[in-house]
Amino acid sequence: MSESDVEAALDGLQDSGGAASGYEDDDDAIIVLVSAVEHYSYCPRQCALIHLEQTYEENVFTVRGRLAHERVDTGDDAANRGVPTLRSMPIWSTRLGLRGKADVVEFHEGVPYPVEYKSGRRHGIHADVQLCAQALCLEEMLGRPVPRGAIYYHATRSRHEVSFDERLRRRTVELIGAVRAMLAAHELPPAANDARCRNCSLVDACLPQVVAEPARLRGLQSVLFRAWDEEESEADPRRRTHDA
Ligand code: SF4
């Protein structure tokens, strides 16, 4: 499959409407974004804050990540010159109700090979499941097996190759189902309040130390409502008379 064959195949897929049609009518049909799979794997609450509540905060890690993706879009990081490559490629799976964008898809002798760009060092299994979700989309879109891909880490300027074995595929499909169930339930999962929170850009919105300790949360709620009651009494003279 040459680069022009791939582009022609993509044009055909986009003309046919891709995965977007028919997926918004009921809970089973909720579309899951590929990025949500990584977020859920890292912390289900983080995933809910971003994808249910549209909360987004920048920190040093998210800024680095954004800059890393911008460099990919300009082609500055092309590691395999001479290999047919598509950048910022829209991807989807109708079967899994999944949609997203692949940073880079290389074609090694016609075999699609997704490459995800990350700032920093190893993101471990969380990045691997995101990449595997991309591979599942590409297999369905292009009708070809996608056995491997890679994560490129800017901090070490190195590629970590990921093999999409059965175990990783199963884990990825489970996570897609878990994200969909969470979106359907419209509920924030409990806070992890552990080492993950140190590097999380959503720590100020999430307040893990507060919400993970029910006694502390109850104390804060009582202070909050006492202050609110006092304000209401000040503002409403009838209530002041009645209370007196
Ligand atoms: S602060 Fe911690 S619990 Fe809250 S979203 Fe981030 S990682 Fe999850």
Image (tube, grey):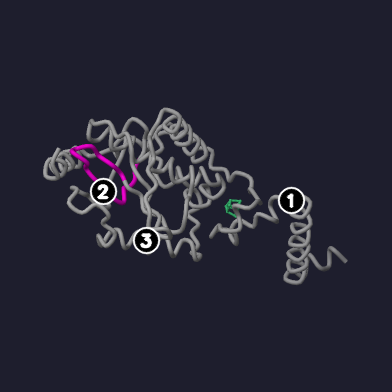
Q: Are marks 2 and 3 in contact (CB under 8 Å)?
A: no
Gap between marks 1 and 3 measured at Cα: 36 Å
Residue 239 as seen in the image, left or right of residue 55: right
Residue 137 as seen in the image, left or right of residue 172: left
Name the residue carrying label 3: 68
Q: In this view, does 92 lie above or below 167?
A: below
At 57% from the left edge and 43% from the top edge, which residue is drawn?
187
Give the image quarter of residue 7.
top left
The mark nearer the N terminus, 1 or 2, is 2
x and y percentages locating residue 224 in the rendered image = 74, 62
Q: Do the residues labelled 1 and 2 touch (CB within 8 Å)?
A: no
Camera-side residue: 233 or 210? 210
SS class, disc 2:
strand
Q: Does the magenta stretch include residue 68?
A: no
Instruction: Look at label 3 and name its amino acid.
Output: Ala
x and y percentages locating residue 208 in the rendered image = 65, 54
SS class, disc 3:
helix
At 31% from the left edge and 51% from the top edge, which residue is drawn?
103
Camera-side residue: 156 or 168? 156
Count neighbours of disc 2 (C-alpha within 10 A) and say few if under 14, some if 14 to 19, many if 20 or more.
Answer: some
Gap between marks 2 and 3 measured at Cα: 16 Å
Q: Residue 54 carries which label?
A: none
At 15% from the left edge and 43% from the top edge, which residue is drawn?
11
Count of picture labels: 3
Instruction: Look at label 1 and name its amino acid.
Output: Glu
Name the residue carrying label 2: 89
Quarter containing the N terminus: top left
Count neighbours of disc 1 (C-alpha within 10 A) and say few if under 14, some if 14 to 19, many if 20 or more.
Answer: few
First to last magenta residue range: 99-114
Name the residue carrying label 1: 213
Instruction: Look at label 2 and name its amino acid.
Output: Met
